[in-house]
Image: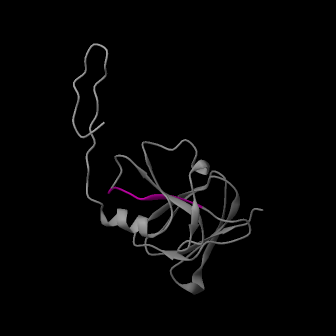
Amino acid sequence: MGNEWVEPTDEKRAGHGTFGRPKTDYDLFMESEGVPVYRDFGVLRCQDLPMRPWDRLGGNGTYVQLYGTEGTWGMYVVEIPPRKELNIERHVYEKNIMILEGRGVCEVWHDEKHKQVFEWQSGSLFSIPVNAYHRMINMSG
């Protein structure tokens, strides 16, 4: 169907149009990362999303953009290989993490001499503070 609305009749449903929008800087950034960008209204199982190696993070992953949340927050799914770790990250925003499977540890620090280390497992939910260095380590496998 094109970009025009179609009026419904007794036997036909109304058609729908499409609206184009320019790509945002975040869209361009996600595309530059070389991993899939999943766009939809929801996700049934994150484990079933298409993933590719993600050089910046050091695991396999995909971005998730749910319709209606664009420009509000960014989400991604990353798989940490067994007995491996992700690359060190640091963000200018608070990061919320939900663990889907496995177990491991997370290191968080502002100063290398004062690292905080805690364990995580399936179902864990935690936040990484603004501007904190952090690294996820998978102890499963």
- Tell me if residue 6 comes above or below residue 136 in the rendering: above
Instruction: Say if the magenta span includes residue 133.
Output: no
Q: Nearer the viewer, residue 25 or 100?
A: 25
In this figure, which colouring scheme has been used for the structure? one colour
Q: Nearer the viewer, residue 90 or 14?
A: 14
- Tell me if residue 90 comes above or below residue 73 in the rendering: below
Quadrant containing the N terminus is top left
The residue at the point 58 percent across, 45 percent down is 45
- Tell me if residue 104 comes above or below residue 41 in the rendering: below
Left or right: 121, with 21 as reference point: right
The residue at the point 56 percent across, 51 percent down is 49
Q: Nearer the viewer, residue 115 or 84?
A: 84
Most distant residue in the top direction:
10
Q: Position of residue 44 (x, y in %)?
A: 55, 41
Numbered disc total: 0
Most distant residue in the right direction:
141
The residue at the point 57 percent across, 58 percent down is 51
Q: Position of residue 65 (x, y in %)?
A: 42, 53
Looking at the rendering, the stretch of residues picked out in magenta corresponds to: 71-78
Left or right: 50, with 91 as reference point: right
Residue 106 in which image quadrant: bottom right
Most distant residue in the bottom direction:
113
Q: Position of residue 18 (x, y in %)?
A: 28, 42
Instruction: Say if the magenta span includes residue 76.
Output: yes
Q: Position of residue 16 (x, y in %)?
A: 28, 34
The residue at the point 47 percent across, 64 percent down is 95
Quadrant containing the C terminus is bottom right
